Amino acid sequence: MTSLGDQHRMFIQAFMWKKFFSSDEVRQLHKECHVKNKVPRTELKNFVDRINSAISPMNMAIKKGTDEISGEDYYVLINADDNQISRLSSEYKPKELELFKKIINSIVLSDEGKVKSIDALNLADEINVPKKDGEEIVNKFCEDGWLMKNDGCIIFATRAIVELQHFLRKEFKDDVTICTLCQNIVFQGDICTSCRKKIHHHCRNKYFSGTRNSTCPSCKVEWK
């Protein structure tokens, strides 16, 4: 990373510590990195692209993803080479990872891309983890940005969708759904009543915003 300046290194260090930031947090971090190092501010995209070029030999990258519920953008530091769940063994205990894997499986195989919170705790029972401990484990994965709670259910948070994209496509290639518009995996979205294709809420909003087009981007039938 010798080609990077102190402002870039400060930015990377922040991601090494927290792993993911909202778009607002990234803009503020980007500003602070330049102000504290007394260098002219550069455009955020070019700034991140330069960092990614420098850290790519280490199989690392800062990727941008969108929250499926809020539509807010997030930036995530990922291991671009190894996104298998097993690599998280240095951060989580075996039982924690085992429950996480079961929750992943339940979410992916569900029709609505989510699992009820009570059902997640029942999964803890299956691996001989008390429900109280199971709830603490789920909370831990929520705090770390892998999962999130929504209306009594557990869904994937942006970090999981961005960082585990390759893993999910490989391990669940016949079960994951791809958004017709952005070509990324979609769990929470809208389904065309005609062709049953699913698109993200935020992709739908962008697609139909400011245009007279009201047809499905896949089958071209009137979107209902």
Image (cartoon, grey):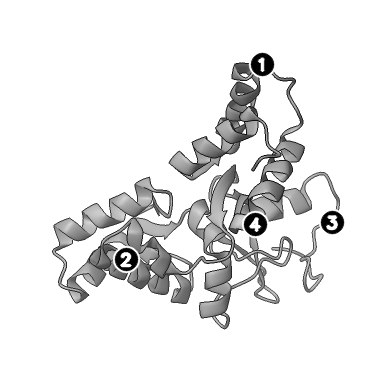
Horizontal and vertical percent for residue 8?
Answer: 64, 34
Whole-number angstrom distance, CA of label 3 to CA of label 4 = 44 Å
Whole-number angstrom distance, CA of label 1 to CA of label 3 = 48 Å
Disc on res. 57: 4
Q: Earlier in the sequence, mark 1 or mark 3?
A: 1
Whole-number angstrom distance, CA of label 2 to CA of label 1 = 43 Å
- As shown in the figure, which amino acid type bears the numbered disc 2? Leu
Q: Residue at x 76, y 31 (%)?
A: 43
Kindly indicate whether the residue at mark 1 contacts the one at mark 4 (C-beta within 8 angstroms).
no
Viewer-side label of 4, 2: 4
Q: Residue furthest front?
A: 2
Horizontal and vertical percent for residue 193?
Answer: 66, 71
Whole-number angstrom distance, CA of label 4 to CA of label 2 = 28 Å
Q: Earlier in the sequence, mark 4 or mark 1?
A: 1
Whole-number angstrom distance, CA of label 4 to CA of label 1 = 28 Å
Mark 4 neighbour class, 10 Å CA radius: few under 14, some 14 to 19, many 20 or more? few
Residue 221 figure quarter: bottom right
Q: Residue at x 82, y 70 (%)?
A: 220
Q: Using the image, determine if residue 84 lies above or below residue 154.
A: below
Horizontal and vertical percent for residue 106?
Answer: 39, 73
Disc on res. 97: 2
Q: Which quarter of the rendering shows the C terminus?
A: bottom right
Horizontal arrangement in the rendering, residue 164 relative to residue 92 (left or right): right
Q: Earlier in the sequence, mark 4 or mark 2?
A: 4
Mark 1 neighbour class, 10 Å CA radius: few under 14, some 14 to 19, many 20 or more? few
Whole-number angstrom distance, CA of label 3 to CA of label 2 = 45 Å
For the question of whether residue 172 can be seen, the reply is no
Q: Residue at x 59, y 44 (%)?
A: 75
